Image: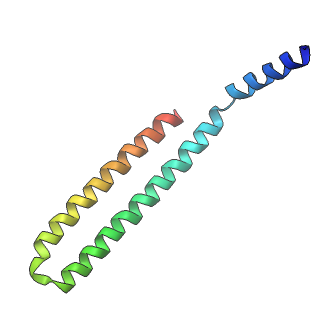
Amino acid sequence: MSTLFVLLQEVVKAATDLAPIAKMGASIAAALVTIGAAFGIGNIGRSALESMARQPEAAGNIQMSMIIAAALVEGVSFFALVVCLLVAL
């Protein structure tokens, strides 16, 4: 019976030592968010340029849509970075 209590005490002690692992996970998540946002904005730009090359008369509308979509992706990635930094603190 006392072995069970010792084991439970060790589990509780190990659970309180997870702060460094949480910080490492938050930094990895922040890196993945940055890479994902860069990849997404790159795809938006590539698709917009292809669309403008195929239909030059709609370049203004396509460019405006591209800027709005890139801003939304950037906003979501910024929010995710803030969450990761809050977890790391």
Residue situated furthest left in the rendering? 57
Side (left or right) of 11 relative to 58: right
In the displayed structure image, the side of residue 63 where residue 39 appears, left or right: right
> Total label count?
0
**x, y percentage for residue 27?**
54, 46
Report the residue that reaches farthest toward the top: 2
Above-or-below relation of 39 to 47: above
How far from the left and from the top, in percent, is residue 49?
Answer: 25, 78
Q: Work out whether 33 lies above or below 13.
A: below
Q: 78 or 4: which is nearer to us?
A: 4
Image quadrant where residue 59 sits = bottom left
Q: Position of residue 16 (x, y in %)?
A: 68, 25
Residue at 18% x, 64% y: name it: 65
Locate the N terminus by quadrant. Answer: top right
> Which residue: 30% across, 68% down?
44
Residue that appears at 35% across and 70% down: 43
Give the image location of residue 80, x and y in percent.
41, 45
Q: Quadrant of residue 52?
A: bottom left
Left or right: residue 12 compared with residue 73 = right
Which residue occupies 46% across, 34% down?
Answer: 86
